[in-house]
Image: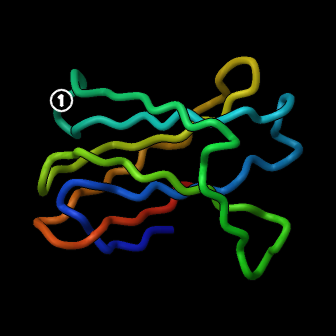
């Protein structure tokens, strides 16, 4: 679920496509919500459209896509809660919050939300 290779100021968020049975229309994009663990006032929303998000095909299941988006400008060595939700005309349910920490310095942080 999670690969930890960190950057002190960025996180690479990856997630799987919404199963067809759970889609309520054409997926137009995704909302990534993130905030500092102990500070709800830092909540930020990023709208990632279907056409602008990076897509990679998984080797085991070529029909399933993994989506990628990098969050930048984050605090060094800080814990963040991150969720992802797909949207059609309106936003669907968010993933479970994932707790991740930026690095002390030097690398990029990668994690997968399923």
Horizontal side, residue 89 vs residue 69: left or right = right
Q: Residue furthest front?
A: 52
- Secondary structure beneath dot 1 equals strand
Q: Residue furthest top?
A: 90
Q: Residue at x 16, y 50 (%)?
A: 78
Q: Is residue 53 above or below residue 105?
A: above
Dividing the picture into quadrants, the one containing residue 55 is: bottom right
Residue 26 location (% of width, % of height): 84, 33
Residue 16 location (% of width, % of height): 66, 56
Residue 72 location (% of width, % of height): 30, 48
Q: Which residue is mark 1?
A: 39
Horizontal side, residue 82 vs residue 20: left or right = left
Horizontal side, residue 22 vs residue 28: left or right = right
Dividing the picture into quadrants, the one containing residue 4 is: bottom left
Residue 25 location (% of width, % of height): 86, 29
Q: Residue at x 71, y 74 (%)?
A: 58
Label 1 CA crowd tier, 10 Å (few <14, some 14–19, many 20+): few
Q: Residue at x 22, y 40 (%)?
A: 37
Q: Quadrant of the C terminus?
A: bottom right
Q: Residue at x 72, y 70 (%)?
A: 57
Count of picture labels: 1
Q: Residue furthest bottom?
A: 59
Horizontal side, residue 7 vs residue 3: left or right = left
**Colouring of the image:** rainbow
């Amino acid at each position: 679920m999670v690969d930890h290779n960190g950057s002190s100021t960025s996180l690479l968020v990856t997630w799987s496509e919404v199963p067809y049975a759970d889609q309520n229309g054409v997926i137009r994009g995704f909302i990534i919500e993130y905030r500092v663990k102990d500070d709800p006032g830092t909540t930020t929303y990023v709208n990632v459209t279907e056409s602008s998000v990076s897509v990679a095909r998984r080797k085991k299941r070529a029909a399933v896509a993994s989506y990628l988006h990098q969050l930048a400008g984050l605090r060094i060595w800080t814990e963040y809660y991150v969720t992802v939700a797909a949207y059609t005309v309106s936003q669907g349910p968010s993933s479970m919050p994932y707790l991740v920490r930026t690095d002390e310095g030097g690398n990029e942080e990668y994690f997968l939300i399923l």
